[in-house]
Amino acid sequence: MNSAGARVEEVCTMREEELEQLHRAQKETLELELSWLPKPRIKYTKRFLELQKTKAGLWLKMTGYGVTTASICLCPFALRNIDLIQFLGAFAYPSCILTCTTSLVRLHQYHDAHTVHKALVKLQPVEEKAFLAEYNAQIALKRQALEKRQAHDREKLRESLTDFRLREERERNKVIEKHSTRLGTTYGPFHLAPQVHVMLGLKILHFVTLLTWLHIVLAAAPICYGSVKSKLKHSERSMGHAHVMALKRRPELAQKPSAHWQQRAHFASSAAALRGEQLAQAVKGKASGSAIKVADLTSIHDFGKGLSGTVSTYEDTATAS
């Protein structure tokens, strides 16, 4: 595997490790949240609760004005109708006071109490086991939901990395095929040539490089002349366009002129309207602002001593004569 393929695999491995680290953190967070949950109160079924009430029994006692105290022992299975019995008692005896006694010992129903107690003893572990199983199933559902999300993340990452590997492999193959076409050989990953062909391709590349340099040396003068000519042509064209645009600017009477009348930094050295001056400076070989001063031909001539560094054409002609 070449260096490019190794880098691709390194990136893929790093992304897989990051995802695994994220999944471990999610699992630890979920387990911590589950450990903080309080122990649930056991919720018995309706049948179990009715048996508990049946075991307690019911002693209904009615006392009131003008009513002889009466005690009624209700059947254990009539406990569901206790509200109806209290309603009827209050309707028949409005001034009565209803009191309940819940003790099978006082009712002297020891055999029935023992039978109900045995049923409750057998039923209570089953009820608790079923409730805990349902609670554990809810906890397991949370873990399964997290595992499902993580499996989906792993599948998405696998598809993304597969696409990334294939895309990088296609790019490498394009580069290899491009260089193979230039060398006249085929040594790509799918068309591996012998080592002799590779060496021959390198020799051909070296020979082509030498020919290229020889061509450059032999054609240096025409190339330089053509490049200078094209540069002058483009400079003249851009300068003419800049002059036309400058003439079309509208005059402004403002304290702060707009951007059309403001000159940016390095305007003198890079503006298209000043290509002639820039070319003259380049020909003279002087930096901007340090060129040789020449007397203007259109201004009034002062034949006295000029400025320092000024060259006078008249003085040169007189001296030569």
Image (tube, helix red, strand yellow):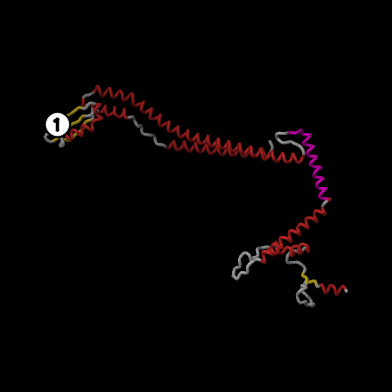
Residue 207 occupies quadrant? top right
Residue 230 occupies quadrant? bottom right
Q: Amino acid at mark 1?
A: Thr
Residue 194 % position (x, y)? 76, 33
Please report the residue visible at 83 percent of the width from the left and 74 percent of the height from the top: 315
**Magenta span main SS:** helix
Residue 76 % position (x, y)? 24, 26
Residue 268 occupies quadrant? bottom right
**Helix, strand or loop status at disc 1:** strand
Question: In the displayed structure, would residue 111 be above or below residue 21?
Answer: above
Residue 12 inside the magenta-drawn segment: no
Question: In the displayed structure, would residue 168 be above or below residue 216?
Answer: above
Instruction: Describe residue 265's horizontal placement relative to residue 196 as left or right.
Output: left
Question: What residue did someone put label 1 on?
Answer: 69
Residue 204 inside the magenta-drawn segment: yes
Quarter of the picture containing the N terminus is top right
Please report the residue visible at 25 percent of the width from the left and 23 percent of the height from the top: 112
Quarter of the picture containing the C terminus is bottom right
Q: Observer-nearest residue: 318 or 182?
A: 182
Residue 26 % position (x, y)? 50, 38
Question: In the displayed structure, would residue 81 be above or below residue 259?
Answer: above
Q: Which residues are magenta?
A: 192-217
Instruction: Describe residue 214's horizontal placement relative to residue 70 as left or right.
Output: right
